[in-house]
Image (tube, grey):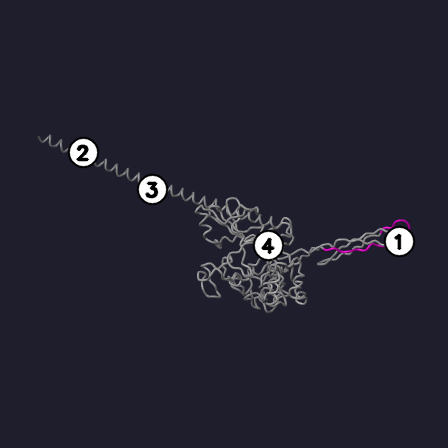
Amino acid sequence: MNHFCNHQRADALRTARAGGSRGAVMIVTLWIVLGISAMVLIFARSVAVELFASANQVSALQADAVAKGALQYVVAQLDGSDGAIPDPTTFPCQAVSIGAGYFWILRPPGDNETGYCFGLVDEASKLNINSATADMLMVLPNMTLAIANSIVNWRSPASAASSEGADSGYYLSLPQPYNCKNSPFETVEELLLVDGVTTQFLYGDDTNRNGILDPNEFDTALGVSGSSVSSANAVDGGWNNYVTVYSSEPSSSTSGTGSGRTGTGGGTGTGGGGTSTGSGTGGRTGTGGGTGTGTGTGTGTGARGSTSAASTGLINVNTAQTPVLMCLPGLDQADVSTLTSYRSSTNADLSSITWVTTAIGRAKATAITSYITVRSFQFAADIVAVSGDGRAFRRYRAIVDATTSPPSVLYWKDLTYLGWPLDPTILTSLRSGTGLAGSTASATGGAS
């Protein structure tokens, strides 16, 4: 009997031990499955992140390619322009499709304009800080005499520095010292190195330089944020909209006349050509030849040679805004209003500066003749490019010089860090896959 009971107890103990072992195996198995599942989830998450990052990278490359394509579009439009302003009717600059992406060429609003504006800006419509006098600089909004003289000192030789502006003595006394450059400005941004110049003076309230007051920007004059200001209000874009360092145009070619010498003697005598040569602006070369029988005089006409010297800083009176025209010597607000009204009339002939004499009279026109032109050869393009899926955008500012063929790029700066400058709904529309309903042009200039 005792033997049977002991046997039952042994069986029960073995059964309990076997059940415990199976439970332990199950728990270990569950932990292993859980660990593997976690690793699978982590791996899947990593793959998803990599795919997302790769898609963003592809979109960024596409946006960059679109921006560079837009630059070539601008270069092609300006090639052979010979100082003329591109016709906006054949040069679309808003929501232009190129490949799968789009680009815009943004510009600041002109006189009596508000909101987003598109197109190139000719640099001759601005005041060149490398050639403007202190008196001309003084007319710019918010300019002071000390800053104007400091600007002139920065670009001038040390021997010609004005005592009323900062020089190297001041700059070397700063916590982070540097020398006064004493040579021409290379970029407009270089103004920020000049004593007294601040980002507020240079860029105004338009910190992202898109021509409108965004909700996160502040209207200094009104003392309110952009979210409280109507989009119909003009935004203060600072001096950046009115100054340049790039405006220059080649000297014009005109004709000259040379007189032939007298041939004497019997038969046929040949007169040699007369030649005159001058250097600098207005220099000319004339060549003439003549043939006489017996005694005769020959005359000929030759071309006046163009000189290597270029005219720097001439202001295009056909395109300059009111604040820039006000900088011209001797002009007042009434004169500038007359000029802007005259040039906007439908029958105005603006092919030469003679229209200025008609508008404001000979005396005032003569006083500004050496400062003005009707041609532009350097153009600014603020290019905003976006990928077709709206995932990425790029923004670049370019300065293109059309004095050569093909035109050359003088300046190319990435402004993407300033953020998306256009209507946010554009990105929303592209990301949703609906595209841009307002896109009507392609980079070839035709309808898309």
The CA distance from mark 2 to mark 1 is 145 Å
Residue 379's label in the rendered image is: 4
Residue 438's label in the rendered image is: none
Amino acid type at image mark 3: Ala
Which marked residue is nearer to the observer: mark 4 or mark 2?
A: 4
Badge 2 or badge 3: first in the primary sequence: 2
Residue 295's label in the rendered image is: 1
Residue 286: horizontal and vertical position, in percent? 77, 54
Q: Is residue 200 left or right of residue 38?
A: right
Residue at x 53% of width, y 56% of height: 117
The CA distance from mark 2 to mark 3 is 35 Å
Badge 4 or badge 3: first in the primary sequence: 3
The CA distance from mark 4 to mark 3 is 58 Å
How would you classify the magenta stretch by its main secondary structure?
Answer: strand
User: Quick one: SS at disc 1?
Assistant: loop
Amino acid type at image mark 1: Thr
Q: Which residues are magenta?
A: 254-270
Badge 4 or badge 2: first in the primary sequence: 2
Q: Crowdedness of circle 4 by 10 Å Cα count: few (<14), some, many (20+)?
A: many
